[in-house]
Image (spheres, rainbow, N blue to C red):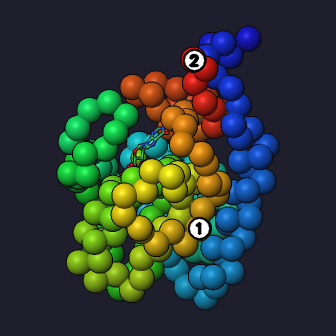
Amino acid sequence: MAFYDSQLDVLYSSAQLQARIAELGAAITADYAGQELVAVGVLKGSVVFFSDLIRQIDLPLATDFLGLSSYGSGTETSGVVRITSDLSRPIEGKHVLVVEDIVDTGLTMQFLIENLSTRKPASVKVCTLLEKPSRARVQVPIHYKGFVIPDAFVVGYGLDFDEKLRNVPFVGVMRR
Ligand code: IMP
Ligand code: MG
């Protein structure tokens, strides 16, 4: 018995996640052939996905991270986003791949794409593990997505509830 067994139902198992991430990595490898890219992980939710994804990309790449927080409370973003920890290097002239855990309302990603674009990168694309289109408030371009999910609050594989459950090895839904 793991500590989370009585709390969670499995939505995507570790094996399902790895199989899909291998496909995403292959698509990214093909699309960026002959180019170098900078993979930018959005802290903290994307770190588990990020670490698996970059090992499926067969290209020279650099990594960087960016911390964001949105004002507001509970499980809902307010849309007022702020950078709490910035990239360590300039991205001017670079091909940037933003790696996110989940696009929910889209407000966080909209802010991030706009912000990064002002730094004159060669390109900016988005790779998210999960998308919840039923809650979208703005349309943001998502070039690579792992799974489209229904409107449920998911945890595990990097995603948290109140900073916990990020270490669960699968994507799960909390039992009521
Ligand atoms: P958005 O700005 O509404 O798209 O929110 C994006 C952020 O909210 C994600 O990067 C997550 O950190 C968080 N989030 C949204 N939905 C969930 C969820 O179901 N579980 C855990 N975190 C979530
Ligand atoms: Mg996040």
Q: Is residue 28 above or below residue 72?
A: below
Q: Is residue 142 above or below residue 160?
A: below
- Say what secondary structure mark 1 lies in: strand
Amino acid at the residue labelled 2: Arg
Q: Quadrant of residue 122?
A: bottom left
Label 2: few (<14), some (14–19) or many (≥20) C-alpha neighbours in 10 Å: few
Q: Position of residue 36 (x, y in %)?
A: 52, 80
Q: Nearer the viewer, residue 75 or 58?
A: 75
Q: Position of residue 127 (x, y in %)?
A: 53, 64
Give the label, 2 or 1, closer to the camera.
2
Q: Position of residue 166 (x, y in %)?
A: 52, 32
The residue furthest front is 134
Q: Position of residue 56 (x, y in %)?
A: 69, 62
Q: Give the residue number, with chain letter if any, for mark 2.
A: 176
Which comes before the other along the chain, label 2 or label 1? 1
Name the residue rendered at 63%, 73% in the picture: 28
Name the residue rendered at 45%, 64% in the picture: 98
Instruction: Give the Cα distance between marks 2 and 1.
Output: 31 Å
Q: Give the residue number, with chain letter if any, for mark 1.
A: 144
**In screen coordinates, is 166 left or right of 147?**
left
Image mark for residue 43: none
Beta carbon at label 1 within 8 Å of ligand 1: no
Q: Can the viewer see residue 20 in this picture? A: yes
Name the residue rendered at 71%, 31% in the picture: 10
**In screen coordinates, is 107 left or right of 152?**
left
Name the residue rendered at 63%, 32% in the picture: 172
Amino acid at the residue labelled 1: Tyr
Q: Can the viewer see residue 58 in this picture? A: no
Label 1: few (<14), some (14–19) or many (≥20) C-alpha neighbours in 10 Å: some
Q: Nearer the viewer, residue 67 or 130?
A: 130
